[in-house]
Image (spheres, rainbow, N blue to C red):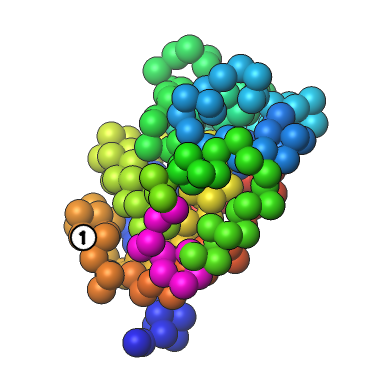
């Protein structure tokens, strides 16, 4: 198999600027629990920990500074966030720092940005169980935990989200607030996408193994973000 790292693909061309933000430290982080189902993740009891609120505020200040340095107006900011409590609360804090009305049209909960579902056999168990899933990811990113999502599954829904956002907006600064595993996988997809006129041309074929080398998807852990970490994509 050809090593995609040798090709050094140029990033695809987008109509907007994009940042990603992993939610601030959460109650599940503090308790060492896997909370990955939509049903559990949207419960208020699994929102941000006090440190997470501080991290979200710092991320908002960092983004505001970057926008100022780049000459990007705040009114061009669009915030898309996972509907989980920990991501919703993070997005709300960031919006407050930027002065973007959270209940307005520029902030939207997007279900495609939800946490990777690890399946019922892992839900509400210890974080130590993540290692078992990641071991499978490394072996084959197309294999999912029983009842859960594979790396490829997450990659496909994030690619679809990005294609939708890039069709909807033009010249905007889009902040994507999501979770650790999904954001790692998302970055792996972008790092392996071929240089094309439009990213939209390839989205429908993302699940084909020929598009992105499985070795790239299986190495998504190298793109890990800390809680509350902001990163510019393109």
Q: What residue is shown at x 61% (from left), y 53% (from top)?
A: 130
Q: How many marks?
A: 1
Mark 1 residue element: loop
Q: Position of residue 35 (x, y in %)?
A: 58, 35
Which sits in the foreground, 121 or 82? 121
Q: Would you place residue 102 above or below residue 184 in this image?
A: above
Decide whether the magenta segment is chiefly helix, strand or loop. Answer: loop
Q: What residue is shown at x 25% (from left), y 54% (from top)?
A: 203
Does the magenta segment cover residue 143?
Answer: yes
Q: Residues within 10 Å of mark 1 (few under 14, many from 20)?
A: few
Q: Which residue is mark 1?
A: 205
Q: Position of residue 214 (x, y in %)?
A: 38, 72
Q: Is any atom of residue 55 visible in this view? A: no
Q: What residue is shown at x 41% (from left), y 69% (from top)?
A: 140
Which sits in the foreground, 229 or 205? 205
Which sits in the foreground, 122 or 46? 122
Which sits in the foreground, 67 or 191? 191
Q: Position of residue 187 (x, y in %)?
A: 48, 58
Q: What segment is highlighted magenta in the picture?
A: 137-145
Q: What residue is shown at x 26% (from left), y 60% (from top)?
A: 207
Relative side of 88 to 201, left or right? right
């Amino acid at each position: 198999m050809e090593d995609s790292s040798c090709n050094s693909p140029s990033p695809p061309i987008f109509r907007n600027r994009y940042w990603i933000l992993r939610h601030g430290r959460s109650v599940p982080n503090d308790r060492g629990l896997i909370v990955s189902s939509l049903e559990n993740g949207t419960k208020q009891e699994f929102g941000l920990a006090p440190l997470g609120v501080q991290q979200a505020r710092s991320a908002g200040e960092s983004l505001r500074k970057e926008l100022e340095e780049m000459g990007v107006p705040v009114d061009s900011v669009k915030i898309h966030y996972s509907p989980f409590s920990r991501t919703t609360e993070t997005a709300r804090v960031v919006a407050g720092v930027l002065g973007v009305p959270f209940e307005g049209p520029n902030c939207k909960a997007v279900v495609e940005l939800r946490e990777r579902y690890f399946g019922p056999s892992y839900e509400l168990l210890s974080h130590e169980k993540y290692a078992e899933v990641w071991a499978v990811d490394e072996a084959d990113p197309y294999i999912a935990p029983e009842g859960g999502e594979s790396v490829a599954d997450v990659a496909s829904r994030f690619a679809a989200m990005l294609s939708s956002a890039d069709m909807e907006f033009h010249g905007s600064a889009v902040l994507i607030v999501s979770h650790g595993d999904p954001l790692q996988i998302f970055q792996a997809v972008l790092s392996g996408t071929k240089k094309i006129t439009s990213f939209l041309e390839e989205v429908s074929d993302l699940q084909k193994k020929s598009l992105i080398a499985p070795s790239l998807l299986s190495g998504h852990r190298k793109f890990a973000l800390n809680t509350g970490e902001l990163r510019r994509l393109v």
